[in-house]
Image (tube, rainbow, N blue to C red):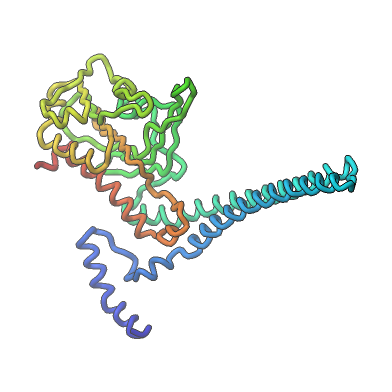
Amino acid sequence: MNQEDYDKVKETLDPLYQRVKILLNGVQLEGFRTDEEIRNSNKNLKDNIKTERKMIIVFIIWVLIWACITCITGQILSALECFGLNISVITGPIIILMFGFIGFVGAIVIAWKIHKIKKANKSDYDSNIVQYALQDILPGATCEPESFLDPNRLYHLGIIPYYTEASGSYLIEYEENGQKCFISNLFLTRQKIGNQNRMVSEVVFSGQAYILKYNSAHSGNVRIITKGKDSLLHRDLVNDFKRRGRDEEKIETGNSEFDKYFNVYASDSRMSSYCCSPYMIQHFLQWRRIYGSFGIAITGSTIAVALDSKQSLFKMPVRYNQIDNISIENSKLELKQILSLAQQIEDVLNGKIYG
């Protein structure tokens, strides 16, 4: 097919393509785009990221060459002395220091260039990929790439374990029926005593945190957390979660499979009965199979969720061969998957899904 025929087909099928997309997922894409066009989108950003990766390789090679030249120079000077060619006490060290200085300055220059390129790429990625995807899926939503949900709040809600250090990214804020909702990446670690009484750092959470709306008329607090084992001491992690209050009691549902994988705590028996009904249990078990460990706390008009997915939303690719996959379309798909889970959690806990 020549270019003229392709343009005619594209012009003819584009309206139909848009209508099909709207019927499938409610999202209208910006024109009919082939796989080749998607790969070529944001080409400058992809080229700059590739340049960053190449500069890292150059930095490693430079350091290795610097180390080798310095070492070889020292060996040559020693060999010359063995053959009776005396090098002055001052000249030898000066030669080595000169090579060392040149290598050090070169490494600093390359490292600075990598830092500048990396910073520019991150800004470009956030502006031209993340923000476009977010506004297409959630018009009016805001995103702060360097911010994240307050882990202290989640800890006091009893859905994340004790931690000593926290980081995160891409705090998304949007409004749903007049109430603000939040999503962000969250990464938690803690220092602890391991084997041979050495302090080690352990990852205790890596995934997403949600603050969603709760519309049920039930009062009281309830939290549901998946059971887990300490990877170093092989003990139950239940004591690493903060207790909500004296009125909170541990609940046994009578469902052996559910009680095997979950701990449930509630301050109100009616609330616990509602959250541990058969259809709720079915969804909790399904989420565990799909997403792994998670914690859910319901208090007042708020649902707080900590999903230990081991993945990061909007993470820039690490491997060189993944760079060409960067696109607004892929970021929108990633965001829709995260929002789909958030909506499903809201619908299940608010009683909109039965089964």
Q: Is residue 69 visible?
A: yes
**Residue at the image point whose x is 42% and y is 30% from the top:** 202
Q: Does residue 53 appear to the left or right of 261 in the view shown?
A: right
Q: Position of residue 76 (x, y in %)?
A: 79, 49
Whether residue 337 sits left or right of residue 68 in the image: it is left
User: From what the image shows, is residue 345 above or below residue 274?
Assistant: below
Q: Quadrant of residue 353?
A: top left
| Residue at horizontal 28 percent and vertical 73 percent from the top | 14
Q: Is 52 on the left or on the right of 140, as rendered? A: right
Taking 161 as reference, is 17 above or below it? below
Residue 143, how many percent across, how many down? 41, 46
Q: Nearer the viewer, residue 346 or 53?
A: 53
The answer to which of 291 and 267 lies nearer the viewer is 291
Query: In the rendered image, which quarter is residue 215 located in?
Result: top left
Q: Residue at x 28, y 35 (%)?
A: 293
Q: Is residue 304 left or right of residue 255?
A: right
Q: Position of residue 184 (x, y in %)?
A: 37, 41
- Res 300 seen here: no
